[in-house]
Image (tube, rainbow, N blue to C red):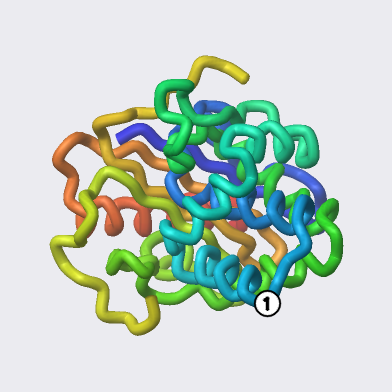
């Protein structure tokens, strides 16, 4: 398994622990934070938009993300957010896969920068909306995958999280029953990814992983949860 992580103390303004913080991974659904922030900056947001944005952030709805990706100009969303948030390793999907928003390249360091921009640089209304949705992250995604691996299972509230998964097929082997639904990048296409990211109390916690070929969602989730617990404990001991 290839993994990278960062724990950043928002109050002290410093990194507590990090490992391979600038290595790039394909984003999976973690990019949905950038989609939401960009859409709210570029458009007049209707009541229907807010409902769809909320579903995308809380329950990781892919159909909603695809709609915002197309309306925002696809790669141009990433280009705008790189400038706004001061991202260094984030890049649009490969040119031959322009519609694959989940193939955006990002690093653990840039996910920390995204959360720092969210809490300190985004317009107040946008910040409050996005954080409110991430605090209400549902146990299940709308695609039936369990969202409670990593931070939600390993660490105590308060937290606001955005998870990411890719490469496990369109239907989970074990359906979730929790209720509610830059540089050349090595994206690990062909191997599953599982990411857990969020704000936990005063800390930004980011754990990105590229799993071995053939890893089941259950096994990968357990591995990420265990790693998250270890990383956070090493940061705050």
Q: Which residue is mark 1?
A: 47
Where is the C terminus found, in terms of image quarters?
Answer: bottom right
Residue found 58% across the figure and 71% down from its top: 54
Q: Residue at x 17, y 51 (%)?
A: 216
The location of residue 228, given as percent across then percent down, is: 44, 54
The one of 83 and 237 positioned closer to us in this rendering: 83
Instruction: Tell me which corner region of the image, top left, top right, bottom left or bottom right, holds residue 131.
Output: bottom right
Q: Quadrant of residue 175?
A: bottom left
Quadrant of the rendering where the N terminus is positioned:
top left
| Residue at 63% across, 62% down | 199
How many numbered marks are there? 1
Left or right? Give the position of 13 relative to 225. Answer: right
Q: Is residue 233 visible?
A: no
Q: Height in image: 182 above or below 147?
A: above
Q: Is residue 123 left or right of residue 36?
A: right
Residue visible at 60% across and 49% down in the picture: 71
- The answer, for residue 32, to whether it is visible in the render is yes
């Amino acid at each position: 398994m290839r993994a990278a992580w960062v724990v950043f103390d928002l109050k002290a303004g410093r990194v507590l622990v990090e490992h391979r913080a600038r290595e790039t991974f394909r984003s999976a659904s973690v990019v949905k934070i950038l989609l939401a922030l960009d859409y709210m900056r570029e458009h007049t947001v209707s009541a229907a938009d807010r409902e769809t944005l909320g579903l995308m952030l809380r329950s990781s709805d892919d159909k909603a993300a695809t709609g915002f990706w197309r309306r925002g100009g696809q790669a141009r969303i990433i280009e705008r957010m790189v400038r706004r948030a001061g991202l260094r390793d984030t890049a649009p999907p490969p040119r031959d896969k322009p519609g694959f928003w989940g193939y955006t390249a990002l690093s653990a360091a840039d996910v920390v920068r995204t959360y720092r921009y969210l809490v300190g640089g985004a317009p107040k209304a946008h910040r409050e909306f996005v954080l409110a949705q991430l605090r209400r992250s549902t146990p299940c995604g709308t695609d039936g995958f369990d969202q409670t691996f990593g931070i939600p299972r390993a660490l105590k509230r308060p937290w606001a999280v955005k998870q990411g998964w890719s490469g496990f097929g369109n239907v989970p082997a074990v359906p979730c029953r929790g209720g509610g639904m830059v540089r050349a990048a090595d994206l690990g296409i062909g191997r599953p990814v599982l990411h857990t990211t969020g704000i936990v109390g005063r800390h930004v916690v980011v754990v990105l992983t590229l799993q071995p070929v053939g890893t089941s969602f259950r096994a990968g989730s357990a591995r990420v949860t265990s790693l998250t617990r270890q990383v956070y404990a090493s940061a705050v001991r």
